Image (cartoon, rainbow, N blue to C red):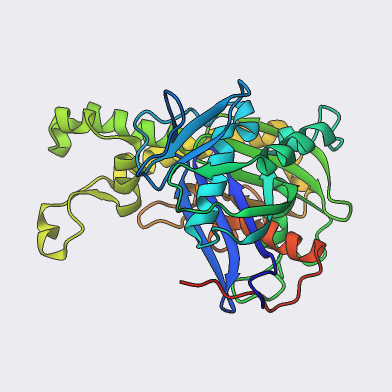
Amino acid sequence: MSKNNPVYVALDCGSGNVATVMENKGAVQIRVTPSFVSRVLGQAHESDSKTNWVTIGASGELETYTVMNKAVGAIDTRTPDYQLSAACRVLVVNALTSLKLGGRKVIIADTLPADQYYDDNNAINRQQIELKRKSLMTAVTNATSDIAAPDIVCVEIMPEAVTAYNAALYTQDGQDNPYLIGAKDVAIVDIGRYTCDIAHLDCDNHTLFSRGTTPRGVHIMLEAVKLQMLAQAETIGIPVEKIRAMTLDDIDAIVRKGYYGSSIEALKDKRIYLDDIITAAAASFASEINYYLKTIVKSLGSIDALIIVGGGAYYICGLLRGIPNFADWHDNVVVPHQPETAVARGAYLALLARHDVEDEQSEIEA
C-alpha cells in the first residue's frame, strides 16, 4: 500500500496503560505502555526530549506534557475528565509516534468506559462521544521540531464493553469461540489498574441492560500485598525500609513472579517466595469484584457467559503461577487470550469492519 493511504490503529487509553493494535507487514502488532504523563510547567518551548508534547490545555492555552516510564509526578488518570483531557490526547499521540507513524495519515479507534459512553438511561451519550472525538482531533506537536506527529484524519469512539465482547468472540488462532456461539446476553468484567468496569450486554443489539464502574482496580490488591509484607516483614525476612520504598510497580513485579529477589537463575537460592501473601490478597480482591458484579447483574444464572478481561484477569483467573482461580462465578467463564489487550483488539476488529478494510495493510518502516 502507498504511504498516502491511512493506517488503521485501535487504542485503549486507560488510566493504567495504553494498549495499541495495528497491522504491520501482515502481522497484528500489539503494544502496551503505562499511562504516565506529567505537565511541564512554564511556557511551551522546544526541548531535546522526544516525549515532550505541546497541545491546547483546559485553559485554552498551549501547554507542554511529557510522557514518562515512571509514575513519579504523574497526572492522576483516574478522574472522569481524564478521557477528554490534554494528557490523554498526548498519550495517544505519543503511542502512535512510537509505532513509527509520525507524519502518516492515521484512522484511529479509541474507547470510552461504559459509564461515559452511555448515559444514566443506558442510551448512547453522543455528546460525550463527540467531545472525546474532538479532543483526539486537536493538534499535538512534539517539542522537538524534527519529530513529526501522526496526522489523525478520522476518530471512531467505541464502548469498552462491546469491544471486549468483540475480542472474546475469537480464539487465539482466530476461530469462533465455541463458548460464545449462540450467546444472547453476557456480563463483561473489565478489571484495569485503577478501575473495574462491569456491563450486562445484549449481544444481538450491542446495547446494555445495566453497567457500572468502581475504583476497585488492581491497585487495591497490590496495596494489600504491600501492607501484608510490611506486617510480616520479620517473618518473611525483608527489611521494613525496603518494603516501604517499593512502588506499586515493584509490588506488581513481585506478584507476577511470585517472589522477592532476582530473576537471574544463578541467584534463585536468594529468592523469597510470597505465595501465601499474594494468594490471600488475590482471594480478597476477587471477593470484592464478585460482590460488585452481583450489584450490576442481579441474576448471574440468567446470562449465557461471563467474560473477564483487563490486566486484572491475570490475578484472579488462575493465569499466574501459584495464584488459584478465584473467578469461578459462572458455569461459562470466558477469559480471552491476552485479556489486558482485549478492549483494544476488539476495537481494532470493529474499526476494520466500519471502514470495510481489506486484509492487507500498509507496511510500516522500521
Left or right of 323, for residue 201: right
Kindly give the residue lying farthest to the top in the view shown: 59
| 10 lies left or right of 353 | left
| Front in this rendered view, residue 56 or 300 | 56
Which percent across, then down, holds residue 89?
59, 40
Q: Is residue 354 left or right of residue 146?
A: right
Residue 334 in view (yes/no)? no
Judging depth in this view, the residue of 309 and 26 nearest the camera is 26
Q: In the picture, residue 6 is in which quadrant?
A: bottom right
- Is the residue 269 above or below the residue 279 in the image? below
Quadrant assignment, res 48: top left
The residue lying at 30 percent from left, 32 percent from top is 226
Instruction: Name the residue: 60% across, 70% down.
Output: 23
Q: Is residue 209 visible?
A: yes
- Image x and y of residue 104, in percent: 61, 61
Q: Nearer the viewer, residue 219 or 42?
A: 42
Residue 170 coordinates in the image, percent (x, y): 68, 68
Q: Say which residue appears at 66% left-offset and 39% top-offset.
A: 138
